[in-house]
Every structure is written in C-alpha cells, then in structure tokens.
Amino acid sequence: MIFGTLIKQLFSKPATNPFPARYMPKSVTALLAKVAAGKATIHPPVPAPADLRGKIAYDREKCIGCQLCIRVCPAKVIEFLPENKKIRMYVARCTFCAQCVDACPVDALATTPNFLLADTDRFSKNLIVD
Amino acid sequence: MNNDSINLKVGQCAATTYSVPVGPVHPALKEPIRFTFNLDGERIVGVDIKPGFAHRGIEYMGMRRNLIQALYLSERICGICSISHPLAFTQAVENAAGIEVPPRAQYIRTIIGELERVHSHLLWAGVGAHELGFDTLLHLTWNVREKSMDLLEELTGNRVDYAIPIFSGVRRDVPAEKAHLAYEALDYYKGLLQQMIDAFLHDKSVEMRTRNVGALSYDLAVDLCAVGPTARASGVKKDVRQDMPYLAYADMEVKAITPEDFGTEPHGDVYDNIIVRLLEVKQSIEIIEFCLENLPSGELMSIPKVPALLATLKKASGEGLGRHEAPRGEVIHYVRLEEGIEEPAVWKVKAPTYSNLMAWVPKFLGDEIADVPIIAASIDPCMCCMDRVHMVDTVGNETTRMKEELVRLSREKTRRICG
C-alpha cells in the first residue's frame, strides 16, 4: 500500500536536514575557519523559531538582585552573588522552561533562540551567564 | 552416554515447559521491565512481570520543592506525555487552592494536549511497525510525526517539555499570526491520514502479524481496569474526556473511539490498538480545529504575577485531584496543600501504564515468543512514568511486599502513632 509513496520519494528531496558538510572533514575547526574566511561553504543550519526557548540572556545593569528567579528555577541553575547583588547562571543545568524570564520583575532576563550549547566543559565561558 | 539416554532426555524436554527471561534490559523492550515467560514450545503458557527498574523518586523530590518548581519536575515524569502530567498536576493544585483558569487558557491547554496525542500515537504506530520488522513504515510514520513536533516547537518554544501550563492559566498564547501554521499542519494531517490508515490497516503483512495477537476480551479489560486505547481497543467506551469533561472538552462532544467506529468487532488485539490510535489522531485533529475556531478571547492567567501566585499557593490548603486523558490512558495526580508551606504536602501520581500493566498477562498467554515485542509495545508502556515504589531493605537488597504484609505494616503504623 505504501509502494506508490516510496516510488514518489525517489524523486523528491530527502525529508531529513542535510549534515553541514557533505563528507566528514579531517578537522572540524579547520573547516569552520575556512567557512569564516569565505573559502568553503556548509549547509546552513535549519532556522529556529524566533521565540524558541534557548539560552537565557541576562542584562546585568537592569538586575535589581531580588532573587525571584532563584526561587522559581526548577533546576537550581542560578547562583546569587551577594557582594554585588547580581546573579550567575550555569546553563549546563538549565531545562529551558524560561520561568525565570516570566518571574523577573524588571525584564533583566530574556530568551534567545540560541540552542547550540554542546560543550565538553560544563563551566566553559559559553555556558556561564553573568 | 548411549543413545537411549539421549532419547530419554529429548523426550523429557519436549514434555516440560521452560522459562525465558526477557529484560530488564533487552532489545525487544524500549524501557526496563522484566518478563519471565513459561514456554511450551513456542507458545507462552505463563508470564511473570516485575516492574520497578526505573524508579526515580520524583514525588519525593517534588515534595521538597515549591509548587512552581515541582510543576517543571512533573513535566519530566515522562518525555512523551510531557504535557499530560503538568495538565493533571495543575488541575489538582488549582482544585486544591481554588484557582480559576480563564477560558482561553483552557482552550490553549487543550490544543497542546491534543497535539501531544497526535505525535504520541504516531510515535507508537512507528514503534509498532518497527517491532514487526516493517522499518519502511517506521520511517514514513516518524516523518509524518515531525510536522506535529515542528508545530509544537513553533507554538511553545520547545520540541519536548513545553512548559506551557502554569497554575491559573498558560504561559504562552496561540496568537492569530501563528494560527495559520496550525491550520497548515492540520491540513497536512488530514491529507495523510487516509494514507496512514491504508498503510497500516489495509496491509496484509501488518494484518497477519497483529490480528488475533495479544487479544484482550471486553470482560478482562473491565476487570483489570485497563485504561486508554488499551481498554478502548477491547470495546470499552472509556475516556476521561467523555466521562468527566474538563478543560475545553466540556464544550464539545468527545466520544471514546472503539474499533466499532472503523466498522469491525472489537477483539482487543494489536490490530485493534492500531485502529483506535489512528482514529484518535483524526479525532485529535478535529478537536484542535474546534479549539482554534472557537478560541475565546481574554486573559491567559488569572494570577499573572509570579510573586502573587507563589503567595496564593502558600496560603492555600486543601486536597485536589487532577485527571487527564493522556495518550496512553488516564493519568491522575493527587495533591494536598498545607497553609504556610510552599511545597506540596503530598503528591501522588498514577500513570496510565500502571493500570495497563496487568492487561499484559492475558495478552501474552497463548501467543508465540516472537510476538513478545509487539504485544509488549501494544499497551504503549512507559515504565519511568509508572515506577513509583522500589523496595529495598537496610542493606540494599530488593524485597517484595504482598498485599497482606502491606496491610499489616499499615496497621502497625497506626498503632505506633496512636501510642
């Protein structure tokens, strides 16, 4: 019964998203450097919706240190810095529910569509927001 | 060893049954559970089921967090039912605290809940095809399923664990500029549904592997308190959305789907399970369409400010029960709130698989060992949803307590407390 569908698929584009490079490069960083220099091209990433709940952005200036975000965070991502009454977030623990964004009374927190957060070090610069 | 003794041994083997353990970790299973099958040749003559390998103590963790934190924990009870558990949990807390939910929020909860049913049933159908060895159908089904995942991502911001319901409402609107995406997805499914039904239900190899395999009679389904599609495949017209309407379901006529809607007599076998789940995808699409067309205007939350919500929940005391028809069946959350503490005093979760577990025994009996994967998958089991208790003694050995002993322990505790 699905034979017709299968025949049709021979002539249509794959349903899956293409891998960035056609073949596995010898060095990923070298390829990315080439792409940055404009010497090579990769398949662009699939666009994410603008209101995707990705990495949380933090506006340090707006923050008043009320700690409401710490009270509602289910994953205990947020650490309070008592010396200057600001917060620090460890994104490696984040569950991306964005409840802290809803809780913030001064809109110091916001969601960004950035979801490329894979890292080998959970304390790397990319994974700590402060 | 002479020939006579060999012949004797062969003869003895043929006359006895032998037991085959499957699991806790086994390629035929998606999640850990242990079956011990007694086989007579290829035929299953007895089965013992031992759950309890995926217990995580979620209720205990939730009772040590405030209610908003526990809400996101409830979402993680199950990765597929990641809206069903929060929907039941929010209803339980709202009932306990007496919080009103605005109509628009109820409709949006319904839309997301039904979208989850669409993707969960298609996921199940794909897994079923895979267990039969029909991987082409698995990939086709999961390709079709992607559309609902994309729509969920657009509407909620997350592909799984949507974080949409909150006590007193929902956190995200379905705005008019995104409704066209939903309609587009619904049209896509309407066009493909007949094709899916043809691929599964009018396919000779699927029918041969699933008809009269894992049958569960109407009486047994009622006696064993099966829920969800497992019960409905046996012809039991049981659906929380029909029996006790909640959210937006009260505004529409939701009818429990049984194989009779497809024009066949219910057998309760795997084929009937496929019928029920595919027809429920169609039903869900109709419900989403109704909700989108009749989406009431108004606010999203009755208590929009988080500090006010936390204060209301801290003041509240009482008991609440939340029920929701999850894709796998009825999920129940019980919550007791006490004044002055932010944590739930008691939180009890009953996942649908717990009710369907015993339906496995009559389903397995009389079938062949090769049918184990598809019968195990037919109730759409979710072990980590279900495992609420794991008993170990003080040195870490596993123990099993039967009903009589639990009753005795309970009575002893009463005596101890009363002095």
Image (cartoon, coloured by chain):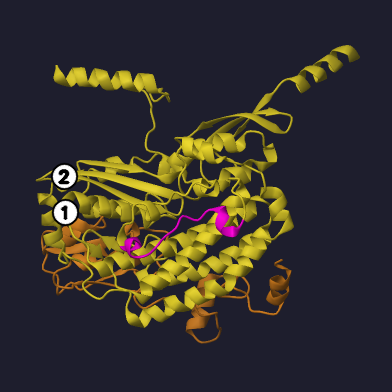
Q: Which color has been applied to chain B in this rendered view?
A: yellow
Ranked by sequence position, the earlier of labels 2 and 1 is 1
Q: Which residue is mark 2?
A: B318
Q: Which mark is residue B64?
A: none
Tell me if residue B139 comes above or below residue B418 in the rendering: below
Which chain: orange? A
Q: Which residue is mark 1?
A: B98
Q: Give residue B76's position: percent from left, percent from top.
A: 36, 52
Tell me if residue A74 comes above or below residue A98 in the rendering: above
Q: Mark 2 touching mark 1, by CB under 8 A?
A: yes
Dot 1 crowding, Cα within 10 Å, few <14, some 14–19, many 20+ = some
Tell me if residue A101 comes above or below residue B243 in the rendering: below
Residue B1 showing in the rendered view:
no
Instruction: Please tell me which residue is depicted at 69% across the width and 41% down the height of the picture.
Output: B370
Q: Secondary structure at mark 1?
A: loop
In the image, the segment drawn in magenta is B248-263
